[in-house]
Image: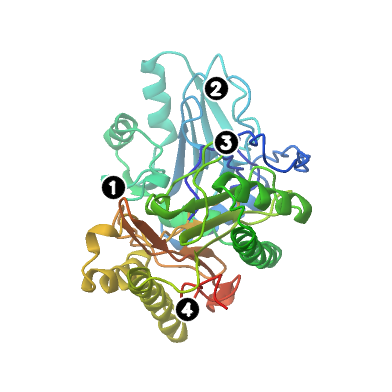
Amino acid sequence: MGPGLLAAALGAALGQIPTPPPPESAPADAAAVPAPVPSEKPPVYEGLTPQRLARIQGALQREKLDGWLFYDFRRSDEIAYRLLGLDPAGARSRRWYCLVPAQGPPRKLLHAIEPRALDGVPGTGATYTSWRTRDRELGALLRGVRRVAMDYSPRNEIPTVARVDGGTLELVRSMGPEIVSSAELVAGLESTLSPEELASQARAAELLSADLEAVAQEAARRVRENRPATERELQELARARWAEEGFDPEAWPGVAVDAHTADPHYAPPTSGGAVAGRGSLLLLDFSARLAPAGIYADLTRVYFLGESVPEDIQRIAGYVFQARDAALQLLRQRSEFGKLPTGAEVDAAARNVIAKAGYAERFLHRTGHSIDHHGHGDGVNNDDFETRDLRRHLPETCFSIEPGIYLAGRFGIRSEIDVCLPGGRVELRGGPGQPAVPALLAH
């Protein structure tokens, strides 16, 4: 799953945002791991290039919208910065507005003390000082605009695009335009990937798949040698492999043992953690992208460090694996008909299996999330639980399917696979999902 970690810096072209893990330091008894040297180059901010403008305007025309009104206050809308190709650094203490019309050059409105905040955007510009002049100039900017997209979501149903505050929405509506959510536009412009980006995701998933198995086997080896590893030691082993494989040093390997597996976003402490001993359940959740700017892979698997898997773990895992496969089956069926499902429909396919098994209240999160340059992207999420994502999945995108059942104080099972849709076809990345929980000490 990979936890939703705070964005470290805004990227340049269409959503390149690295996401750091919680600050941690290696335990004293862990093997020394050389600190990886970040290989990511400083982002290049090209501004709103003719190609980028044409892509945005093409999307507006397809949606029959008059324009897209971007608004920012103190870097409140990172989507605007990405789509307009702007550097978020520098003075950003005043509100600015930028209308990208379906046809013609953009129109800008900036405060007089920060008149260069939109220098990377072509088109005409005006300035304001007081709220009175702001209202007058904004009204002029919106003259003739009937339907305009803004980065908001009705009822905050898709919070990843809900960047504009309610007061600004009231102000714009008072000037006449009907405001439409930009959620569909954002999904199409931010989450669709090039062939090169899809290839980087495939390579990352292939490596992570091997890393999961290697770390699990190391945990089993340590048990056989009667010196079981801690969660933290296994996490450091994953990081050492990632440094050699060229993953972004800010990537996040999740390791949880026994009762900790029932916490979907558990992270080991900076020293030690639970011991992965004989009879332990081990959950590994690896989320990473290849440096300098690849697409994330995000895979989760579970293992049992014993000779045979207990019946209750087998039973719960069976429900989770069936839910995962039901979601995947829906995607494959709809793909064959050329009409991909919505994120909400994929969520329902998985959730219904777990509900019928009697564990609806123990499936604590959505079924999956969008994947792009940041692990949890701005595209379609498989969700009709935490949020209501009625957007339809798009070709050339990636996302996770990761149902889970969490029994507090006992254990949790989650199975996460990555799905990509090149040309609208369903492809699994990093191999198929686990068919069963493996007993790693079986003879």
Q: Secondary structure at mark 3?
A: loop
Indicate the position of residue 196 as horizontal and vertical percent values: 71, 64
Judge left or right: residue 127 versus residue 152. right
Q: Residue 337, relative to residue 133: is it above or below?
A: below
Q: Any mark on residue 92, and which?
A: 2
Q: Earlier in the sequence, mark 2 or mark 4?
A: 2
Q: Is residue 65 visible?
A: no
For disc 4, the marked residue is: 435
Q: Residue at x 46, y 60 (%)?
A: 281
Indicate the position of residue 65 as horizontal and vertical percent values: 41, 54
Name the amino acid type tagged 4. Pro
Q: Earlier in the sequence, mark 1 or mark 4?
A: 1
Judge left or right: residue 294 versus residue 285. right
Indicate the position of residue 348 as horizontal and vertical percent values: 29, 69
Q: Any mark on residue 154, and which?
A: 1
Nearest-to-viewer mark from 1 and 4: 4
